[in-house]
Image (cartoon, rainbow, N blue to C red):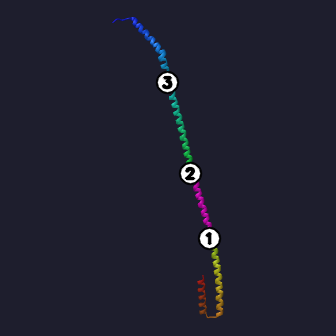
Amino acid sequence: MEFYWENTVFAILAFALLYFLLNKYAFGPLFSVMEKRREMVQEQISSAESNRKEAERLLAEQQKAMAEVRKEAQEILEQARQMSGKEADEMIRQAQEESARIKEEALKDISAEKDKAVAALRGQVSAMAVMIASKIIEKQVDEKSQEQLIDQYLKEVGGKL
């Protein structure tokens, strides 16, 4: 096997020329496309990170808003409970006042009717007493018949009451 230096120089020149052409027309655009792709991926990663941070911020705001809404709902429910309790107390107080008023009126009516009944009874008793006295005077009876007559009239009066 013989060594030909011309072939080696020719191979080196061909390789250098091929490297120059590949570098200019193949590797340059290929590396350029790869660099653009790397930049695009990096941009998408940073965009995704900013979107994630924005989503976390919005989620935190939404959770805070929900907590406030729940708190307001609890306050509204508590106010409604207090209001209904106050209204119930007011209704009970009014019912008690009304029942006291009705009871007082009933007691007044009972007292008035009692007074009327007592007055009527007094009138009847006095009329009976006058009748008894007139009968006693008319009859001039002895003490025993006078007592029987009084007892009889008292029984009559007791029967009418």
- Between tags 3 and 2, which lies in front? 3
Looking at the magenta stretch, what is its main secondary structure? helix
The image shows residue 78 at horizontal and vertical percentages of 56, 51
Q: What stretch is highlighted in magenta?
A: 80-107
Q: Which of marks 1 and 3 is in front?
A: 3
Is residue 97 within the magenta segment?
yes
Q: In which quarter of the image is the C terminus?
A: bottom right
Amino acid, disc 3: Arg
Task: Please state the horizontal and vertical placement of residue 35, each as a whole percent of the image.
Answer: 49, 22
Residue holding disc 2: 78
Residue linked to disc 3: 37
Q: In the rendered structure, which disc, 3 or 2, sits on the residue that comes first in sequence? A: 3
Tell me the residue at 65%/77% (across/down). 116
SS at mark 3?
helix
**What mark, if any, has residue 156 been given in the picture?**
none
Q: Are marks 1 and 2 in contact (CB under 8 Å)?
A: no
